[in-house]
Image: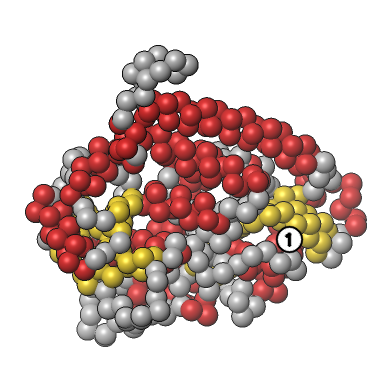
Amino acid sequence: MEENKRNIPSDAADTRERAVLVAVIRDQDEPRRTEEYLDELEFLAETAGIVAVRRFTQRLPQPSSRIYVGPGKLEEIAAWCGEQQIDVVIFDDELSPSQTRNIEQAMPCRILDRTRLILDIFLSRARTAYAKTQVQLANYEYMLPRLSGMWTHLERQRGGTGTRGGAGEREIETDRRIIRNRIAKLKEDLQRIDRQMAVQRSNRGQLVRVALVGYTNVGKSTLMNLIAKSEVFAENKLFATLDTTVRKVVFDNLPFLLSDTVGFIRKLPTELIESFKSTLDEVREADLLIHVVDVSHPQFEEQIDVVKQTLQEIGAGEKPVYLVFNKVDAYTYVAKDADDLTPPTRENRSLDELKRSWIARENTPCIFLSARTRLNIDKFRSDLYGMVREIHAGRYPFNNFLY
């Protein structure tokens, strides 16, 4: 059993909720990777306005189907949270309804799982009616099987004339029915908005479409602002962008459409993938995907795999891709000692070595740049122009003399 205290400076003016993070290290997992996952969970908590003050981890073959961790570890976490007056415990996996109920009985404070935390962030960051509708749908679908654990006061009996089940209908059944009705209404609203957006896309004609995709917080919106000279909201937080933004861009008289989409993340809740599939129509209908990668992140290769898997899930896995390794200005490494014969890791490889290894791969066009400092941006624009022109030439062979 392992744990890690976080040295968080005390600040009397800090009114944020205080949390502990909990994760299970499966037998096939490396402890270092679990810590990196918890780093991401801590970043999610920070985005939601919560400060993490301690971590608890435990090695198990699989998380307990009843209480996620072992009984002794759960008791230890509950005791520490009670002593330190912790506000919330956050688990780095989606908890089942039964796990949630069992853990709540043992804890002196609120509990959140990874899915609930991401949903809360999406709820707070949704701006347009479309994004709000999508997130509300995902939220209700998450809540529905968990009502008995979330609202225990609904166990009271309700009787009387006019209730659907007659005398004795339980309030929890009434609330389930209300949520099912809301889910049905939200799905109808999404279908209506989808039809409107489909008409908007059809009105754009046959312009070449390029979509920015990537893990969350890799700099897609910053790159979008640089290329399209637009003002898309961008900040150093997870899920800064929820709504798809489309801009018309013209390079040397060659017009095309550029879209910025919601970022992907490891263990993205199923409810969100389903509800945001319509938003990602811009990705599915794109002629070219610009896959933006934060090359300074220790696990950028795993993030690439997460994005590829998500693209497969939404039916865009076979699109042509241009890999853009962003944030080279933040890349760091530690050179290996001359007598160290162990295989090099990401932390030991220089940026030049990394460039050579990726550029040498077949069928993987890529570029290394910094959107923040504009390093190598001219080369990126030139490459993008060439790719868009090639697609345009195939679509309009008689208009090539214009370019």
Locate residue 96, reporting x and y percent.
29, 39
Q: How busy is the neighbourhood of tag 1: few (under 14 within 10 Å), some, or many (20 plus)?
A: few
Dot 1 falls on a residue whose secondary structure is helix
Picture layout, residue 358 above or below residue 109: below
Colour mapping = secondary structure
Q: Quadrant of residue 372?
A: bottom right
The quadrant of the picture occupied by the N terminus is: bottom left
* Image position, residue 107 (x, y; %): 21, 53
As drawn, is 350 to the left or to the right of 196?
Answer: left
Residue at 35% x, 75% y is 347
Give the camera-side residue of 354 and 223: 223
Q: In the image shown, does 38 or 144 lie closer to the viewer?
A: 144
Q: Of the residues shown, which amino acid type is indicated by label 1?
A: Gly
Residue 383 appears anywhere in the view: no
Q: Is residue 111 visible?
A: yes
Tell me: 268 left or right of 8: right
- Residue 127 appears at what percent x and percent y? 62, 54
Residue at 26%, 85% in the rendered image: 338
- Residue indicated by mark 1: 386
User: What residue is shown at x 39% (from left), y 48% (from top)?
Assistant: 115
In the foreground, 328 or 65: 65
